[in-house]
Image (spheres, grey):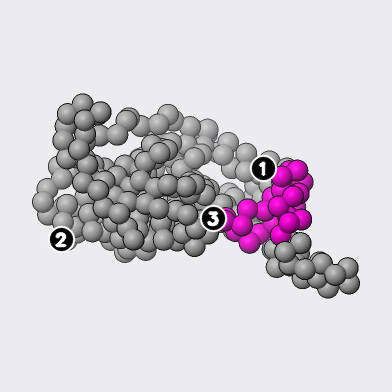
């Protein structure tokens, strides 16, 4: 149910319950694990946590299969619908929760660039955390970094990929590492630059590939900053104390002596 549905039921039952008491009720019973209500994620209130998590586990189990697309974090809309129906869940509501909790981002098959597999369905869901492989390597010099304070709800990869997809020249390149996603930015006809989003937990690395030519940097960096800024501003709608900024590592010396160019977003 939605929070507004519950609020309407509570305030119309004649017991004199106001909206602030509904909020307290939902928060209290979330702490008891009787239901799940996280305002910073979504307006939806989960009344049956066990059934939702059982279905979520089955979705994540798909990443352990021998299917290359699944092990790279892709699952078709039809496969999710079947898993939800098997658990007697509303498929549309379940997919809405996957997106709202930032477990998944829907992608058009045409925007997934892969030579190792093909996806028959027109629409799939990209779920970075269902990939079974280990994390990629530690932060590297000459990358752009996004650092933020406070907690960003959900998977930061899902959040950033969603905002990169608002640009028509961006596509997704499958990546096996659980903490990394690769965005391909097309420019100047047949040229492109790959931007690897790497979640290092306390900081997000935005690593440019393809030799980092001047032309590629001029194309990619403004788009990367715009997409990441839009993503962080989206989070700020529900996380009031969020602060963030961009760092550019400009030396190759020992990690403890790296120098950074810092830009704070007001």
The residue singled out by tag 1 in the image is 53
Q: Earlier in the sequence, mark 3 or mark 1?
A: 1
Q: In the image, which disc is placed on residue 188? A: 2
| Camera-side mark, 1 or 2 | 1
Q: CA distance from mark 3 to mark 2?
A: 33 Å
Q: What secondary structure is found at the residue carrying circle 3?
A: helix
Residue 215 visible within the image? yes
Q: Label 1: how many residues lie within 10 Å, few (<14), some (14-19) or many (20+)? A: few
Residue drawn where x is 52% and y is 34% of the image: 65
Label 1 to label 2: alpha-carbon separation: 45 Å
Say the numbered circle drawn on residue 99.
3
Q: Quadrant of residue 92?
A: bottom right
Residue 231: image location, x then y, percent: 40, 58
Of 20 and 86, which appears nearest the observer? 20
Q: CA distance from mark 3 to mark 1?
A: 15 Å
Pointers 1 and 2 in contact (C-beta within 8 Å): no
**Quarter-of-image position of residue 57:** top right
| Local secondary structure at mark 1 | helix
The span shown in magenta is: 23-49
Say which label, 1 or 2, has the lower sequence index: 1
Please identify, in this view, whether the residue under mark 3 or under mark 2 is nearer the observer: 3
Residue 34, magenta (yes or no): yes
Q: Is residue 112 magenta?
A: no
- Please name the residue shown 10% across and 51% down the image: 214
In screen coordinates, is 265 left or right of 126?
Answer: left
> What secondary structure is marked by label 2?
loop
The rendered magenta stretch, by its main secondary structure, is classed as loop
Q: Residues within 10 Å of mark 2 (few under 14, many from 20)?
A: few
Q: Is residue 124 visible?
A: no
The answer to whether residue 254 is left or right of residue 55 is: left
Q: Which class describes the residues within 10 Å of circle 3: few (<14), some (14-19), or many (20+)?
A: many
């Amino acid at each position: 149910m939605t929070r507004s549905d519950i609020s309407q039921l509570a305030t119309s039952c004649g017991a004199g319950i106001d909206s602030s008491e509904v909020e307290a009720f939902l928060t209290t019973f979330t702490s008891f694990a009787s239901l799940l209500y996280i305002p910073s994620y979504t307006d939806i209130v989960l009344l049956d946590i066990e059934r939702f998590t059982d279905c979520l586990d089955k979705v994540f189990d798909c990443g352990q299969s021998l299917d290359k697309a699944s092990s790279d974090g892709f699952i078709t809309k039809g496969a999710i619908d079947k898993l939800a129906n098997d658990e007697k869940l509303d498929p549309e509501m379940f997919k809405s929760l996957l997106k709202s909790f930032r477990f998944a981002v829907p992608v058009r098959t045409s925007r997934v660039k892969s030579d190792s597999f093909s996806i028959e369905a027109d629409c799939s869901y990209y779920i970075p955390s269902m990939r079974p492989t280990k994390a990629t390597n530690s932060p590297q010099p000459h990358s752009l970094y996004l650092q933020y304070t406070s907690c960003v709800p959900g998977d930061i990869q899902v959040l950033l990929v969603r905002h990169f997809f608002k640009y028509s020249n961006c596509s997704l390149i499958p990546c096996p590492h659980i903490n990394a996603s690769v965005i391909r930015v097309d420019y100047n006809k047949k040229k492109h630059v790959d931007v690897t989003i790497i979640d290092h937990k306390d900081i997000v690395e935005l690593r440019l590939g393809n030799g980092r030519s001047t032309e590629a940097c001029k194309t990619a960096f403004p788009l990367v900053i715009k997409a990441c800024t839009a993503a962080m501003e989206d989070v700020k709608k529900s996380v009031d104390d969020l602060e963030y900024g961009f760092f550019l590592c400009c030396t190759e010396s020992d990690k403890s002596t790296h120098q950074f160019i810092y830009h704070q977003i007001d």
